[in-house]
Amino acid sequence: MTLFVVPAFFKNLRFRAICFACWPIMFVSLVILSLCVSDVLAAKDGPYRISTFSCDTSPPKDGHPLIWLVRVKTIETPLLAKGVVIEAGDERYVLCALDWCGLCNSSYELFRSKLAAGAGVDVSHVAIQCVHPHTAPYTDGDAQKLLDQFKDFPMYVDVKFMDEVTDRLAKSVKDSLARLEPFDSIGTSQAKVDRVASSRRIIIDGKFHGRLSSTTDPKLIALPEGKIDPFVKTITFARGEKPLARLHYYATHPQTRYGDPRVCSDMPGFARKRLEDSEGVFQIYFNGCGADVALGKYNNRSWKARDELTDRLHAGLVASAKATKYQPVKSFKWRTTDVKFDKRTDAGNRIEDNMAVMKDLKVANSTRVRAATRVAFAQRADRPIELTSLQINDVYILNLCGECMLEYQLYAQKQRPDGFVAVAAYGDLGPGYICTEKSFPEGGYEPSASRVSPKSEPVLKKAIRELFGDK
């Protein structure tokens, strides 16, 4: 019985000689091909992958206003939404920093839902935080609905623009999925930032001193720097020791010059771009719990001061990047928790009080907008806000809502003294300032601008513990 048939062309002696002469080349080619295929499969089937995205979210001239009702006249630098899409096995997550002053209530939910749609995930897998420059929009779609009852009121929220900009952002995220690449290590580092942040709340001999984002008062300048977190913390996603994206976390109000109709990402945007250009690595900047921290001691609102502050922040980012230490990724955990804050019921903060301000044609329109944001939060206070965290090995990223006082960042760090904890605030800014309980009797701007009860401190601290996986 014939087991196989030798093809006629192989009986040709000349053909067989050629085959035997070429077989080493054919063998090497097959080996190289198999290695290439293995690399492709490993990249596709690896447990962790990452991509980056960046989208211009600047409002047009004379369109959607900057903070409160300032109309855009010039664009000094674009306002970017920069982020990463992270895949862990079959799950996908999004971290995004937006160069806006704030997103409140339904406006925050709009951005978050569009990011989720672009990534093809549930909204619970998305965290978006604002960097908080004051040369950028501070937007509350729910407040606009309240203001719609006044026919001649200036535009606060351009609904069409909001839909268009979030559609662009969703497309940017979706396009990034084609660039997902493997990562297998996580880097951590920190460095001191010199003469940038300073406390907005100084108490000396029982006397309160408020020092906001800038001053030319020599007495305020001479006051101590006060309580700050002096370190920028950096988390680097890498393949081996090749950095793919760096995420920086630093706590301070970032505005240098503001109040004019100029779109600008300000000091963090300048420093971030400078490092990205020099290092060739994608850079993202998140603002930590900087509600009671600002640039006031070192900022007289001059252009020179802005340049010097940028230089010093950039120096801190560079030093932190250079100090990166890597470890292989061994574990990955995304957590969520809901938080609900009681609305304020004291005089001046009740719904009826602020409705009266909204209707008062004698007060400034910006004051009426602020009143509308208070009403908007009070009307949604019973609906929880979702907070998120990411844990990789002993590295923790906490994504909080509101303008949180520094105490919450320091509290989070104390929960994991042997871990590496980075905190981003300025998620949903519906609650406004989230202060400590003791700050209310002390006075100052922050408690006056809070939309939540003085009893919010234990609520947020409990949520922080839950974001670490503690019960």
Image: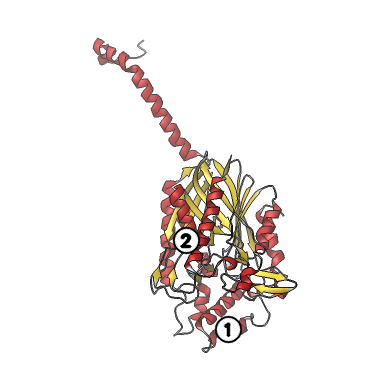
Residue 385 spot, x, y in % from top left:
60, 64
Q: Residue furthest bottom?
A: 362
Residue 288 spot, x, y in % from top left:
59, 60
**Nearer to the camera, 447 or 311:** 311
Q: Residues within 10 Å of mark 1 (few under 14, many from 20)?
A: some
Q: Which mark is residue 355?
A: 1
Residue drawn at (68%, 58%) of the image? 410
Q: Which mark is residue 6?
A: none
Horizontal side, residue 300 vs residue 465: left or right: left
- What whole-number distance in Å separates the C-alpha atoms at marks 1 and 2? 31 Å
Look at the image and tell me in which quarter the N terminus lies: top left
Dot 1 or dot 2: first in sequence order is 2
Horizontal side, residue 211 vs residue 437: left or right: left
**Secondary element at tag 1:** helix
Residue drawn at (64%, 46%) of the image? 394
Residue 399 quadrant:
bottom right
Residue 24 quadrant:
top left
Horizontal side, residue 47 vs residue 15: left or right: right
Residue 384 appearing in the image? no
Q: What amino acid type is highlighted by mark number 2?
A: Lys
**Secondary element at tag 2:** helix
Residue that mark 2 sits on: 114
Q: What amino acid type is highlighted by mark number 1?
A: Met
Residue 98 spot, x, y in % from top left:
49, 61
Residue drawn at (44%, 56%) of the image? 54
Residue 113 spot, x, y in % from top left:
50, 61
